Amino acid sequence: IAQVLYDFTAEPGNNELTVKEGETLTITNQHIGGGWIEAQNSRGEIGLVPEDYIEISVNDPYNCWWPLCVVSVSSLSLSLFLSFIHHFYCSFIPHISPLYVIQASNGNDPWSVWNADPSGGSNNNWASNPEGTQTGKTAPDPWSSVSQGHPQAYQGPAEDDEWDDEWDDMKSTGGYAESESGDGGGIQRGGAHATSMKISLNKFPGFSKSGPELYLLCKQLTKGKDKLPIYVGEVGPVWFYPETQLDCVVADPKKGSKMYGLKSYIEYQITPSTTNRPVNHRYKHFDWLYERLLDKFGSAIPIPSLPDKQVTGRFEEEFIKMRMERLQGWMSRMCRHPVVSSSEVFQLFLTYKDEKEWKMGKRKAEKDETVGVMIFSTIEPEAPDIDLIEVDQKCEQFSRFTKAMDDGVKEILTVGHEHWKRCTGPLPKEYQRIGKAFQNLSSVFNSSGYQGESTLTDAMTAAGKTYEEIAQMFAEQPKKDLHFLMETNNEYKGLLGCFPDTIGVHKAAIDKVKEGDKLVATSKITPHEKVTMAKRVSVMSYALQAEMNHFHSNRIYDYNRVMQLYLEEQVKFYETIAAKLRQAHGQFTTM
Amino acid sequence: IAQVLYDFTAEPGNNELTVKEGETLTITNQHIGGGWIEAQNSRGEIGLVPEDYIEISVNDPYNCWWPLCVVSVSSLSLSLFLSFIHHFYCSFIPHISPLYVIQASNGNDPWSVWNADPSGGSNNNWASNPEGTQTGKTAPDPWSSVSQGHPQAYQGPAEDDEWDDEWDDMKSTGGYAESESGDGGGIQRGGAHATSMKISLNKFPGFSKSGPELYLLCKQLTKGKDKLPIYVGEVGPVWFYPETQLDCVVADPKKGSKMYGLKSYIEYQITPSTTNRPVNHRYKHFDWLYERLLDKFGSAIPIPSLPDKQVTGRFEEEFIKMRMERLQGWMSRMCRHPVVSSSEVFQLFLTYKDEKEWKMGKRKAEKDETVGVMIFSTIEPEAPDIDLIEVDQKCEQFSRFTKAMDDGVKEILTVGHEHWKRCTGPLPKEYQRIGKAFQNLSSVFNSSGYQGESTLTDAMTAAGKTYEEIAQMFAEQPKKDLHFLMETNNEYKGLLGCFPDTIGVHKAAIDKVKEGDKLVATSKITPHEKVTMAKRVSVMSYALQAEMNHFHSNRIYDYNRVMQLYLEEQVKFYETIAAKLRQAHGQFTTM
C-alpha cells in the first residue's frame, strides 16, 4: 500500500526497517506517531520506516485529516474562528481549569517584562540590516537584536527557575551551548545541520545560513514529495488550506519529577482536534519543536517565538497558568498555519506516544535537510513567473507594512501597559479613598445626635461602598479585556519580529538576481543559472505573498475579534458602574 | 405710625433728625434703605432716623418680608430647597450669564489653592485653644491660624490684582491697616468698635474681645428691640424662621472704573427675592458686610469667610465667574440664616440705593454696640433654663461633632482634589493615547494592500475616536459633578472653621460659671451675679443649640442634594461612555 521514495538504512536496535527506493511496503501500523510507520516488506520483515520516506496511497481513509481540497479565504475565516474561540474561551472547555485565563491576581502587569520602546529608535535596524538573520526565540526586541547579534535572552544564566528545569538534557545535545556562546547574530540555534549549513554558506561571504544563494543556485531540487502548492485566490497567492482546520487545546499542567525527585518539571497536556487523544509535553519539547519549525520554515514563514522562559507571575501557579495560556496561543497559531500544521515535525509533536518513538521522530526531524532557504525548493506556485520589478515592489510593500504595523502594535502595547498600571494601581486606590471618605463623613453624621438623618447617612454609606466596589472593578477589569488586547498584540509583536528575517532573505535574493548579468559576465554563474535564479526568486515571491495573505487574513480576524471582545467588556464595565451608581443614587431622598 | 425707642442725635449736614425716646413719628419714606427711614416729628421737621431706633407698627404692609410666624423644620426644607436651587442652577435664571457655573476651562483644579492637610495635625489647635479668636476671613486653615495668631492671608501685600482694587478706600478707615499689622490673634479686623472692645476686655486678662464675661456680667442688657427668639421645636431649640425664605441672585459682573480710569473694579448685581430689585456691590462691599456680620453675630453664629480674594483662574473672566459663584454661595447661605438674613446690616446691603444712603447705613452699622458676645443679650429663649451639666455636655458634643466633621470634610476635599487632578490630567491623556493608538493601527491596516478590510479599519478608527471622546469627557466631568461636591465641602470647611471660635466662647463661659463659687468667695462677683451668669450661660446654650440645629438641618439638606447631584452626573457620565463604546462595538463584524 506504500511506495518507498528514498533509501533508508535502519539503525541497529531501534526496530527500524531498511528499505530501498521503489520498493513496495504493506503498512501494518500507521499510528505509531513521531513520523514513523510500521511496515512489512516483501520478505515479510516488519519494522519502523520514516513516514516521509514512503508514499502512502492518497485514498487511505486514515489519512483523512490532511485533505486535499482547496479552501477559499471565507471558509478559512470560519475555521480560524473555531480555533480562535479556543484561544479566548478555553475555559469553556470542560477539561481546562477555569483558572486558565486568570493571571497575577495581585494586579501586577504581566506585560511589564516586555514594555515596548515607544520611540521606535531601534526599528531603524530594519533598513540597515535587510539580510538580518533569525535572532533566537527570546530576544525581547527582534528589531534591535538583528544588529546587536546577541539575543538578549541569553545574557544571563537561564537556570533560575529551579522547579522547572527546562534545559536539563538540552545541554547534552550541544544545541543550546552553541547558542549561549552568542558568537555573532548569524549563528542558528540548535539542530544537527548547523555545521553543514555554515560550511555551505561560506562561499558567499556576508551571507548567513539564510542567504538565498543556496536555493537560488542549487543544482538539483528535492524530489517531488511534500510539495507546498500555492494557488491564486481572490486575494492573490494563497497557501493550500485544509478543509478542516487543525486545532489543539493546551491544558492540565502537571508537575513531574526525575532524578529521584531532585529535578521537577511541568508537563502540559495537548489535545489535537484531529485525534482528540491528549499528549503530554514539557516546555523543552515545545522549544525543540520551535527550533525545528524555525529551521525548516523560518525563511518563508514567520515562526513566532515561544513564550518567554521567564513569564511574569511570582507564584508557581500563576507562572504555569500564564505560560500555558501563551503556549496555547502559540500552538493555536501554529495549528492555523496550513504549512506548519501539516508538517511532519508538528504532527510528531501532536501524536507523541512514548519516549522511544519520540526520540526516533526527533532524530529524523533533526536529520531533515529541507531547512533554511531550501524550503523554497518544495514550493510549487500554480501560476506564471513574476518579473523582478513586481517581486521587488511586493517585497518593499510588505517590508513597509510590517515595519509600520510593528510600530503600531508596540504603541498599543506601551499605552496598554500604562493603562494596566493605572487601572490596577492608582485608580482603585483613588476610588477606594473616595468611598472611604463618603463612609467616614456618613459615620460622623451619624454621631450628630440630630434626629431623622438615617436616610442620608444610610445613602451616603451605600454610596461609599459603591465606590469601593468600583475600585475593585477597576482593579479587576484589565484581566477581563485589556489582557486579551495585550496578548494579541504581544503575539503580533512576536510575529512581526520575524519579518525582518523573512523579508531580508527575499531582499538578498532580489539583489542577487539584480546582479545576474554581472555574475554571468564575470563567469561566477552560467546564463542558465541566471534564468533559474529569476524563476526561483519568483517562487520566493509567491511564498512571501501567500504568507502575507495568510498573515493579513489572520490579522483581520484576530483584530476584529479582540477589538470586539475588548469593547464588549468595556461596555459591560461602564454599564455595571452606571447601574451601581444609579442604585446608590436612588437611596437618597428625592426632593 | 412709629415710636422712638432710643435717643438719637442727628449729625450735622447729613439730613438726619434728632429724636427722643418715647416720641411719636410719622414715616414719610420707609424705603430709604441702609437702615434709615425718613420721618416727620410732631414739629413738622423731616429727616432721616435709624430704623432700629424706632418701632414701626407691626401691621405695616411694607414690612411684610419679615413676618412673625414660627416655621417648622419641614417648611424650612422647602424654602432651603428654593434657595439652593439658585445656588446650583443659577444659570437657568435669564439675567445670569450661562457662563456662570463654568470655570477654568483648561482643566485646572480650582481647589489646588486650598488643598487640605489630610494629616489633621493642625486640628489639635481645637483643644489647646478653646478661647480662640475670630481669625480673619481669608486664613486658609482656620484651625491652624488660631494658634499662629497671624492670619496667613495677610502675610503678603494684598494689592496684586490691579484691575480690581478692592481695598482702595478701605485703608482710609484704618480698619485694614490695623489688621495688616498682624499684632496677635486677638485683633479684630476693621470696625469702629475695635478700640472700645479691646478696652472693655482688658479687665479679663487672657480673654479676647469675644470672651463671654462682657455678657455674663453685664449690668444692664439692651432694651427690648431686635430680640432674637428661640423656640423649642421637634429637634430641640430652633431659631425663629420666616415663612418666606429670603434668597438672592448674584449675577452680571460689570467692570467699573474710578479716578479717571486709573483704577478699575468689578461690580456684581445682587437681586433679593423680596424686592426683586437688583443692587450693585463691589467685592469690598461684601467684605464690609462680612466684617459687620462677624462683629455682630460671630460669637453665636458661624459667619463663613468670603471667597478668597485670590481665587484660582488665570484669566480675568474665569476669576470673575469663580468669585461670583462663590459670592452667590456665601450670600445664599447668609440668606438662609434667619438671624443673619433679617439683620439690619444685611438688609442694608440688599437694598442699596445710592452712595449717600449707603454711607449713612455704614456709619450706623459701624456704631452698633450689640456686637461680639453682647449678641447673646438679644436672645430670648422661650424655654426654661438649662443646668450647667447639660450646657457643658451639649457644648462638648457639638465640639466633638464639628471637629469630626471638619476632618471628614477635609478628607473629601483632599481626595476630591486628587481625583480632580487625575481626571483632568493623566486620565484624558491616557484615553487619548489609547484612541490614537487604535487609529494609528487602523491607518497602518489601511495601507496593507489587502482587499476588503475597510470594515475593520473603519470600526477601529471609530473606536479610536470614541476613546478620544471619552478622554474629553473625563477632562470635563469634574466641572459637572465633582465641582459641586467640592464647593459644598469647601463651604462647610469654611463654616466649620468658625466653630472653634463659637464653641470657644461657650466653653469659656461655662468655665467662668463653674468657678462662680470661687469668684463669690473672693468677692470678684456678687451671689446675684453668679445666678445671672448661670441664667445667661443657659441663654448661650440655647443659642448654640439653635445654631447647631440650623447647621444640621442645612447640612442634611446640602449633602443630600450634592450627593444626589454628584451621583446623577456620575451615572450619566458612565452611561454615556457605555453608550459610545456600544456604538463603537457595533461597527465591528459580528462573527
Image: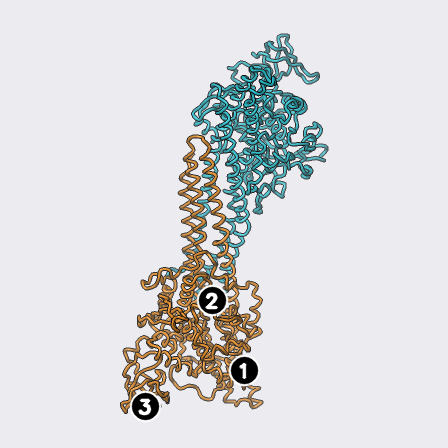
Chain colours: A cyan, B orange
Q: How far is disc 1 from disc 2 in space, using C-alphas? A: 41 Å
Q: Dot 1: what SS?
A: helix
The amino acid type, in three-letter code, at marker 3 is Glu
Q: Chain of mark 2?
A: B
The amino acid type, in three-letter code, at marker 1 is Lys
Q: Dot 3: what SS?
A: loop
The residue under label 3 is B23
Mark 2 surroundings within 10 Å by alpha-carbon count, few (fewer than 14), some (14 through 19), many (20 or more) = some
Which residue is outermost to the top? A43
Q: Position of residue A97 (x, y in %)?
A: 56, 37
Mark 3 surroundings within 10 Å by alpha-carbon count, few (fewer than 14), some (14 through 19), many (20 or more) = some
Classify residue A266 by image quadrant.
Answer: top right
Tell me, yes or no, if residue B553 can be seen here: no
Asked if residue B277 is positioned above or below residue B15 in the image, the reply reads above
Q: Position of residue B423 (x, y in %)?
A: 48, 54
Of the numbered discs 2 and 3, the one sitting upstream in the chain is 3
Q: How far is disc 2 from disc 3 in space, using C-alphas? A: 50 Å
The residue under label 2 is B310
Classify residue B316 by image quadrant.
Answer: bottom left
Q: Quadrant of the N terminus of chain B?
A: bottom left
Of residue A136 and residue A247, the one placed in the foreground of this image is A136
Q: Quadrant of the C terminus of chain B?
A: top left
The residue under label 1 is B512
Of residue B369 and residue B521, the one placed in the foreground of this image is B369
Disc 3, disc 1: CB below 8 Å? no
Q: Chain of mark 3?
A: B
Of residue A161 and residue B209, the one placed in the foreground of this image is B209
Q: Nearer the viewer, mark 3 or mark 1?
A: 3
Residue B435 tag number: none
Of the numbered discs 3 and 1, the one sitting upstream in the chain is 3
Q: Nearer the viewer, mark 2 or mark 3?
A: 2
